[in-house]
């Protein structure tokens, strides 16, 4: 059988996987510092639950069925395309055992049946945080979540970023004030603005029945952005009035004011942000790398008020998701990040002959017991050949026996010193692989 890669299903080489794992560790630790508990949901949900979350949701769902199923049998289950929909189901299923407000994080694979391209995959890893409550959810959580994301991103070796925020009430109220009836359809068109540009968006809006002047007003709203609450005056200057618009302007103003108190300049009120999924009902977020805006969002989310409801109790929530695969692949492909070695191994124990393997294994166990990653050479060979093997793997130290006892050699500097497996420790920076940035490499 001829082997060929499957488009949209990325696989990392070991050194790139090291980068991804360090990102995941940092993100997980940051989420836990902010009080989020980890859960994992099943990979599949009923197709009925996954569908009807937006015009493209049905197209994105991978159906799951037995290979022996009848050819005309509809798939009742589908792989989840995000982590929010399965989380809402999880809350409903376990509500009697959860303490609200419930703060959870979830780091898992998701699957989307879309056309693969740069940054868009059919299988990828997301890292989500959500806060969900029973009955009502205070708006201050809508300020807190982007601050958590900013905390995680500041610990990662990534370029400067911008978190854009809007609230769905602003475009909805504005469109209603203009007399637009298809609010959802208009939101979906405007959400494509960064991808297809204003001319194409105008064409789609007028094609959907809007007059040229109304389409122009829609684009004027989408062009407004600010790092403080001044956006509200810019919107009012457009002369459109509606009570839902007033509610949205007040809510976003509160969010921007509160965010600027804790992290000035972190949030940008950007009124073109809409998010395409139908379950968002309030604040929405997108995050872009500054200077690489054409790549799109690397972190997004929003508030949802009705996604989790059993008919008696509604559990409103707000969440935000880091596209880990999307972010890491971009930074690696542009040469901005790399790992300093291909393996976590810090020490290779060399062999003078195969008779030394038993003693080498005992030394390895002793070093591992003190948290040092070790492997024994695959075969006895000339010492120079074993050093070349370590160098190709990026292993910084080689341990070997001499007539005077064990010694360890730093193959980068050539320094060689006597060593005792009970006490010797490599420098802290060599215990684990590290990530190098483009500036460090140059």
Image (cartoon, rainbow, N blue to C red):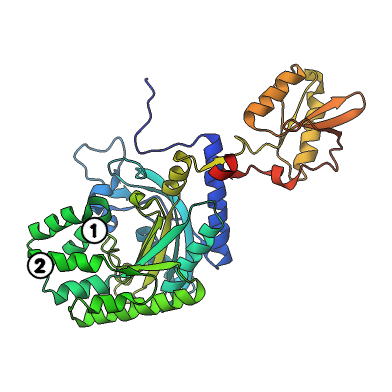
Location of residue 381 with respect to 72 vertically, above or below: above
Res 182 seen here: no
- Check residue 213 in the rendering and tell me which mark sits there, or answer none: 2
Res 302 seen here: yes
- Give the residue pinned by disc 1: 54
Q: Residues within 10 Å of mark 2 (few under 14, many from 20)?
A: few
Residue at image coords 65%, 32%: 394
User: How much space separates mark 1 and mark 2, taking CA atoms?
Assistant: 27 Å
Where does residue 107 sit, x and y in percent of width and height? Answer: 47, 54
Q: Which element type, helix, strand or loop, lies under badge 1? A: loop
Where does residue 369 sit, x and y in percent of width and height? Answer: 77, 43
402 lies left or right of 204: right
Which quarter shows the N terminus? Answer: top left
Location of residue 253 with respect to 34 vertically, above or below: below
Q: Which element type, helix, strand or loop, lies under badge 2? A: helix
Location of residue 438 with respect to 220 vertically, above or below: above
Q: 71 and 340: which one is in front?
A: 340
Q: 201 and 367: which one is in front?
A: 201
- Check residue 113 in the rendering and tell me which mark sits there, or answer none: none
Q: Would you say the residues marked 1 and 2 are in contact, meaning their CB atoms lie under 8 Å apart?
A: no
Residue at image coords 42%, 68%: 267
Where does residue 429 sit, x and y in percent of width and height? Answer: 70, 46
Where does residue 171 sit, x and y in percent of width and height? Answer: 23, 70
Q: Residues within 10 Å of mark 1 (few under 14, many from 20)?
A: some
364 lies left or right of 177: right
Location of residue 388 with respect to 54 vertically, above or below: above
Residue at image coords 36%, 73%: 316
Q: 248 and 108: which one is in front?
A: 248
Residue at image coords 32%, 40%: 117
155 lies left or right of 128: right
């Amino acid at each position: 059988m001829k082997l060929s890669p499957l488009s949209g299903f990325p696989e990392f080489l070991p050194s790139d996987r090291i980068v991804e794992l360090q990102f995941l560790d940092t993100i997980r630790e940051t989420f836990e510092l902010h009080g989020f508990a980890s859960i994992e949901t099943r990979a599949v949900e009923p197709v009925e639950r996954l569908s009807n979350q937006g015009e493209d949701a049905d197209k994105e769902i991978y159906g799951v069925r037995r290979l022996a199923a009848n050819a005309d049998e509809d798939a009742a289950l589908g792989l989840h395309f995000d982590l929010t929909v399965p989380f809402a189901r999880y809350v409903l299923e376990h509500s009697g055992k959860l303490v609200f407000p419930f703060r959870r994080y979830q780091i898992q694979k998701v699957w989307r049946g879309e056309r693969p391209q740069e940054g868009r995959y059919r299988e990828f890893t997301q890292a989500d945080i959500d806060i969900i409550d029973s009955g009502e959810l205070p708006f201050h959580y809508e300020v807190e979540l982007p601050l958590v994301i900013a905390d995680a991103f500041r610990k990662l070796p990534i370029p400067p970023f911008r978190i854009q925020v809007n609230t769905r009430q602003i475009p909805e109220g504005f469109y209603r004030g203009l007399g637009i009836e298809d609010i959802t359809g208009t939101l979906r068109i405007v959400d494509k603005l960064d991808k297809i540009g204003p001319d194409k968006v105008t064409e789609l809006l007028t094609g959907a029945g809007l007059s040229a002047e109304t389409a122009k007003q829609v684009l004027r709203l989408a062009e407004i952005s600010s790092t403080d609450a001044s956006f509200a005056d810019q919107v009012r200057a457009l002369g459109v009035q509606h009570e839902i618009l007033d509610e949205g302007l007040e809510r976003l103003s509160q969010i921007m004011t509160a965010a600027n108190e804790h992290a000035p300049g972190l949030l940008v009120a950007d009124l073109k942000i809409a998010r395409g999924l139908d379950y968002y009902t309030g604040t929405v977020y997108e995050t872009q790398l500054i200077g690489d805006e054409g790549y799109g969002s690397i972190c997004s989310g929003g508030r949802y008020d009705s996604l989790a409801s059993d008919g008696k109790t509604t559990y409103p929530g707000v969440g935000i998701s880091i596209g880990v695969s999307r972010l890491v692949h971009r930074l690696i492909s542009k040469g901005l990040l790399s790992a300093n070695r291909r393996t976590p191994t810090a020490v290779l124990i060399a062999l003078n002959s195969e008779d030394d393997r038993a003693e080498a294994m005992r030394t390895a166990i002793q070093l591992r017991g003190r948290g040092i990653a070790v492997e024994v050479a695959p075969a006895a060979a000339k010492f120079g050949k074993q050093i070349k093997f370590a160098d190709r793997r990026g292993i910084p130290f080689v341990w070997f026996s001499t007539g005077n006892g064990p010694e360890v050699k730093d193959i980068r500097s050539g320094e060689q010193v006597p060593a005792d497996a009970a006490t010797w420790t490599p420098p802290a920076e060599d215990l684990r692989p590290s990530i190098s940035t483009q500036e460090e490499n140059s």
